[in-house]
Image: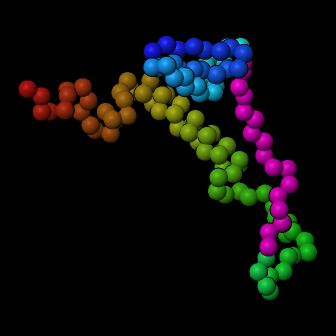
């Protein structure tokens, strides 16, 4: 069995027992780059509304939300986390003990079931 690759037609031929079988684009492509571009649609089709449903004439205006997953809440959460973290570091530096030791848990002697 012998294989013959043709660079001009980008086909791959296999010769077996006197017959030639060819399959296009199985030959290695040298110097050719393949790319895919994905773009979002710029316009969407208008939805079809059921009978009796009307479209409001104006969109209601509301103030910026203060609760939920909004920028303000995330900013306040991160500030509280920073204050708590640095308060814990200061507490450990002042007392010389970790948080678990301050809560009354014995630390450093293992889990109690070692052999």
Q: Residue furthest left?
A: 115
Q: Residue at x 78, y 57 (%)?
A: 64
Relative image position of residue 12 (x, y in whole percent): 59, 20
Quarter of the rendering occupied by the C terminus: top left
Viewer-proximal residue among 49 and 14: 14
Return the x and y of residue 73 as percentages of the image width and height.
66, 50
Q: Residue furthest bottom?
A: 52
Is 9 in the magenta? no
Percent x, y for residue 35?
72, 28
Write the start and end of the magenta stretch as one range: 32-48
Asked which quadrant contains residue 45, the reply is: bottom right
Location of the N terminus by quadrant is: top left
Quarter location, residue 65:
bottom right
State the residue at coordinates (67%, 20%): 10
Q: Is residue 37 highlighted in magenta?
A: yes
Camera-nearest residue between 33 and 24: 24
Report the magenta stretch's main SS: loop
Q: Position of residue 66 (x, y in %)?
A: 71, 57
Give whichever of 77, 61 is nearer the camera: 61
Q: For the point 69% across and 51% down, which residue is it?
A: 70
**Above or below for 48 versus 14:** below
- Is 104 located above or below residue 60 in the figure? above
Nearer the observer, 5 or 72: 5
């Amino acid at each position: 069995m012998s294989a013959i690759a043709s660079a001009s037609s980008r086909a791959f031929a296999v010769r077996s027992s006197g017959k030639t079988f060819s399959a296009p684009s199985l030959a290695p492509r040298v110097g050719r780059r393949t790319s895919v571009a994905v773009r979002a649609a710029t316009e969407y089709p208008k939805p079809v509304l059921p009978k009796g449903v009307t479209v409001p004439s104006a969109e209601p205006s509301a103030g910026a939300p203060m609760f939920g997953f909004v920028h303000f809440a995330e900013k306040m959460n991160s500030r509280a986390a920073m204050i708590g973290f640095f308060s814990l570091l200061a507490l450990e530096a002042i007392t010389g003990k970790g948080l678990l030791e301050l809560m009354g848990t014995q630390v450093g002697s293992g889990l109690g079931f070692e052999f």
